[in-house]
Image (cartoon, rainbow, N blue to C red):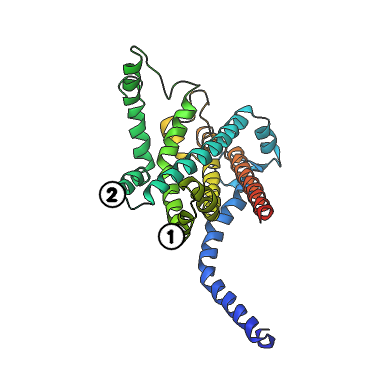
Amino acid sequence: MAFFLNPRAKRRWSFAFTAGLFLLPALLIYGAYTLSGIVKTFYYSTLNWSGMGAPEQAASIGLGNYARLLSDKAFWHAASNNFLLVIVSIVFQLGVGMILALILNTDRRGTKFLRTVYFMPLLLSTVATGILWLLLLDPYSGLFNGILNIVSPQKRLSWLGSENVVLFAVMFVICWQYIPQYMILLRAGMTGIAEELYEAATMDGATRWQQFWTMTLPLLSGTLKTSAVLSIVGSLKYFDLIWIMTGGGPNGYSELMATYMYKRAFSEDRMGYASASAACMVLISFVVIIVFQATTRAKGDHEV
């Protein structure tokens, strides 16, 4: 087929073929370990399977697990917590990450030291981070209640035991851990902006704020979009710190879809039902990302 193509088309076909060969091993691994797992999850979600024994021996109940899942208020409460985490992550992780990236995108003294300090939370393992903040938020000997007692003596707040506070306390820790990730991404994006643009804008009398709003922000739109997608996907499937610090408690007030699924699978031995929960997580994540991509693409086309 490539024999009858013109030279330009031949080069394109050759490039596509070569790129495909290089991508093939990664695609095979992705298909074997990720796509096959997703397919099996949807299959298991149609079974009344406890996780014991072969799934082929379990009775098929069709969409029964989905019907029970969608009528479970605990699942919807966990899903609402996930969406709240999405909003908080985008606003605070990307917002503070942008501020830190702007601070580090200068030649001032001490920026190299600050880069190391700001990046340290991301270097800690999730378990170490969870244990560290459990100690800091301890209602009796924690640093935060120590500071609170200075402001208001005899005042003690159970940061992880209060239904009104626990979710926001854990979200604060999640943001603290992942802000450096977006700081690095945005800082890398800023290095790709030509310094001559800022010099020309300064000569034209543009202020720092005007330069940021009309130059830096639009030129970082691709990096911001990528960061937002990472933040959305990460927030919808988040598990680690919630499980380590609260286990979804108290009374399910810090429950997320992932912790809800984990409890159904390994605490209640309802693997089929947990698979339905996992399948819903996949579908929700897919729909949210598609809507986000369509919205941002439409906005970009409108601006152009």
In the drawing, does residue 123 fall left or right of residue 270?
A: left
Instruction: Check disc 2 and report its element: helix, strand or loop.
Output: loop
Q: Which amino acid does label 2 sit on?
A: Arg
Q: In this view, does 208 lie above or below 270?
A: below
Which residue is identified by label 1?
A: 195
Circles 1 and 2, Cβ within 8 Å, touching? The answer is no
Query: Where residue 83 sits: x, y (%)?
Result: 58, 36
Residue 120 falls left or right of residue 4: left
Seen in the picture, residue 25 relative to 126 is either above or below; the reply is below
Q: Which quadrant is home to the C terminus?
A: bottom right
Spot the residue most to the top. Answer: 154
Q: What residue appears at the point 67 percent right and 55 percent down from the top-left corner? A: 301
Q: Nearer the viewer, residue 256 or 210?
A: 210
For residue 261, say whether it is visible: no
Which element is circle 1 on? Answer: helix
> What residue did someone put label 2 on?
109
Residue 152: % across, % down: 36, 14
User: What residue is rendered at 66% in x and 48% in y?
Assistant: 295
